[in-house]
Amino acid sequence: MSAIVSSATKISLGVQAITGLLGIYGLTIPLAPKDAILRQVLGLEIIVQIIEFVFYLGFLSILNLNSLTQERYYDWFLSTPVMLFTISLYFFYVNFIEGQDKDKDTIGLLDFAKNNSKQIFGFIILNFLMLLFGFLAERGVMDKMLAFVLGTAALCGSFGIIYENYAKYSEKTRKIFWAMFGIWALYGAAFLCPPIVKNVSYTILDIFAKNFFGIFLYYIIANKAF
């Protein structure tokens, strides 16, 4: 592993540790019943960060950059479905609070999963295909440009489901959606870069996509303390 990739990995681990502890503290903040689902959203985000932290510890022992790139996909296969579910659940909560769904006094994770199973299945399958195309290209099984085109199409499809069902109903969710989509799209740009630039970029993007979203959720919870 190059020195710059190693340094970026170590810095990322430090950021992950800090944001993870902040998130765990956020779970202890009391919330009103209508906001309690935020604790579940943050809990899911902490699971994502735990997966990330474990894999990044393992990354330090990988010397070959191509092997490191491939190893990242195992992290993403586990963490990204949870991330998409988490952001969808948060958007659903915002819609509920802003009056898009007035049928209930409270909402819950299980109710959301049960009532939105078709949408969840759709964006998880498309996300899996996006990662599969990238992984096959990194293994040399698929042409890289073909993988990029198909992966980008799958990315747009998965985020399209989220936008149409959860994000488009308020200005707040639309802003967060486009920020998240922009970050995820940058992974595709990094995919086309040389190994060192690619892995440093992936490390930086992981911090924004995973850890900074955790900080955002903590901020929301702290401002809704009951």
Image: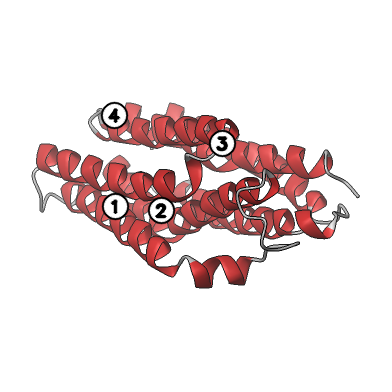
Looking at the image, tell me whether mark 2 or mark 4 is earlier in sequence order: 2
Q: Circle 4 sits on which residue?
A: 189
Residue furthest front in the image: 103
Q: Earlier in the sequence, mark 3 or mark 4?
A: 3
Q: Which amino acid does the dot numbered 3 rest on? A: Ser
Quadrant assignment for the N terminus: top left
Mark 3 element type: loop
Q: CA distance from mark 2 to mark 1?
A: 8 Å
Q: Nearer the viewer, mark 1 or mark 3?
A: 3
Which of the colour schemes (rainbow, by chain, secondary structure, one colour) is used?
A: secondary structure
Secondary structure beneath label 1: helix
Residue 54: percent from the left, percent from the top?
55, 56
Quick one: label 2 or label 1, which is nearer the N terminus? Answer: 2
Tag 2: Cα neighbours inside 10 Å, few (<14), some, or many (≥20)? many
Image spot of residue 127 (x, y percent): 33, 54
Exactly how many numbered labels are in the figure?
4
The span from disc 3 to disc 4 (Cα, nearest Å) is 29 Å
Q: Where does label 3 land, which residue?
A: 170
